[in-house]
Amino acid sequence: MTGERGWLRASRQGDRLIFEAGGAWVIGAAASLDRQIRAAGRPDARFARLDLGALTALDTAGAWLLRRLENELSAAGATVERAGLGDAFVPLLEQITESDAAPSLPDTRPPPYRFGDFTARIGKAVIRAGKRGAELLGFLGLVCIVALRTLRRPRRLRFATLVTHMEQTGVDALPIVGLLSFLIGVVFAFQGADQLRRFGAELYTVNLLGIAILRELGVMLAAIIVAGRSGSAFTAQIGTMKVNEEIDAMQVLGLDPIEILVLPRILALLLTLPLIAFYADIMGLLGGALMAWGTLDISIPAFLRQLRSPLPGWTFWIGVLKAPVFAGIIALTGCYEGLRVARSAESVGRLTTRSVVESIFLIIVADALFSIAFSYLGI
Amino acid sequence: MRVDGRVVLENLDLEVRRGEVLGVVGASGAGKSVLLRALVGLLRPSSGRITILGEDRAALGAEERRSFDARFGVLFQDGALFSSLSVAQNIQVPLREHLALSDALISELTRLKLAVVGLPVEAALKYPAELSGGMRKRAGLARALALDPELLFLDEPTAGLDPIAAAEFDALIADLKRSMHLTVLMVTHDLDSLAAICDRIAVLVDRRLVVGTLDELLQHPHPWIRSYFAGPRGRAAQRAAG
């Protein structure tokens, strides 16, 4: 970057090759110097002389290019001599020569795609998923043991922590859960009315709404939002503590991380998610009722009457019954993935994403299992 | 210089000479890190000017600033390597970002930088989390040196290293300074490196800087400076450096 740009001139005198290098041989000019060296070619000669008198600046990149040129010339069988190298550049070239003894970098390119790689990848993913499922089950067992132990000495439960977590996972989630359920109720009522009007059965929109929201949507929506809000927070909180070696510090101090970190979170979610699901039910029905009133002229009292008459009494309880199960899934995966974080910030992010995806997946699987079980029971 | 409304540094006057190693010392919380962050352009001084390599960074346009930033290297305290990239890729980041070099040349230069900072070739494929603290520092130094900077900032380069590794790191810095004609500004607490490789030392006390060679600072009347250099550790380091 100081003065003239680096250049290289090659000439020939009999069986002597003369390279003249000058200007600034620095990294900024390295790309062009690299090309100039390639362009100079390598006609075989017995002697080669590098005339370096005109060099104005030299850095490691430039020194390496010179060194590489020398290497290639001597590999082609020439005797190489240097001339005119300024004193200031001698230590650098010495250092580069010394470092040149290092072996070259291993090849980092991924192996080319072979037939069957794709199926192998699927197979590996299945095995890994199976292993993780088994580990998660093991974690559930561990949490149960710790929970039973704590049950005998309920004093050990951190009450203040529990309340804080309940506030963060429950109270703080109310606005977003309420808004989304309300909107889903509105959309459902609108779409349902549109379809049912063709049969003159608009009134049954209310039944549709009641069953859909109370049985499935309310609790599902609440669980998915809580998984995104709190499940991810659990993983990130515990994961960050893991990165900071706080979990290790706890163990050394004789504190059980499961008891202190995992148990209050699971308990908090078990207690709050049913309440949030109930709240989501109410808000969803409210949205539906307002929509029914607006577009179908079904007044609120009529809506309530219609809602009550044909619904089996347990519809609501079916929905709320699922909530603790979903809560267990969310809290368990969130805490489990948090404890799996390795000692890098990157793994916190990766496992947080995974915990959300995993818990939503498990929630939907559990919901399907519930449906099957209920249909067997004839409910 | 203010941080969060608190005056951390004021009326500083510091001149770094080309080709010297300047050590910056000061009590914890005295503002060494703030000074370093202001120098490399991460913080803006609330008043005054910082001129590096003859340019005022704050006065440059975005494009000029990019090429200007390539002229100095920074080694952060724990290396600050990109954790999702291998060591080799870390070193290649500035090379690929600022220059259009061929892949072969990039790979050769990476190999060279690793050798220069004394890392084995096997370390190239490792990720930062798999390296020891000393190796992370060396890898961070290799990245800082990737573009052959004229000026190098080091933040506590020997902190957390055992004495042997710290002495080796000092020797490495001295070596590089000699061969690459580097100017080095290092924040350090290591009295041994201050005595061994620093040409001058700047002490941050009472939000100001006192600059001088080790011998000059030994005669300084300020109580903090006296206890820093004349304490048992300071005397041991001077004896070791002869």
Image (cartoon, rainbow, N blue to C red):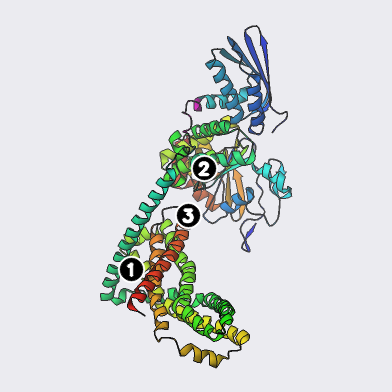
A228 over A86 or under it: above or below? below
Viewport quadrant of the N terminus of chain A: top right
Residue A100 in magenta stretch: yes
At 44% from the left and 78% from the top, the residue drawn is A215
Q: Amino acid at mark 3?
A: Ala
Helix, strand or loop under label 3: helix
Disc 2 with disc 3 on a shared chain: no
Closer to viewer: mark 1 or mark 2 = 1
Task: Provide the residue designation for mark 2.
Answer: B140
Q: CA distance from mark 1 to mark 2?
A: 40 Å
Mark 1, residues whose alpha carbon is within 10 Å: few (<14), some, or many (≥20)? some
Disc 1 with disc 2 on a shared chain: no
Helix, strand or loop under label 2: helix
Task: Provide the residue designation for mark 3.
Answer: A345
Q: A162 and A312: which one is in front?
A: A312
Task: Provide the residue designation for mark 1.
Answer: A259
Q: CA distance from mark 2 to mark 3?
A: 17 Å
Q: Position of residue B7 (x, y in %)?
A: 63, 60
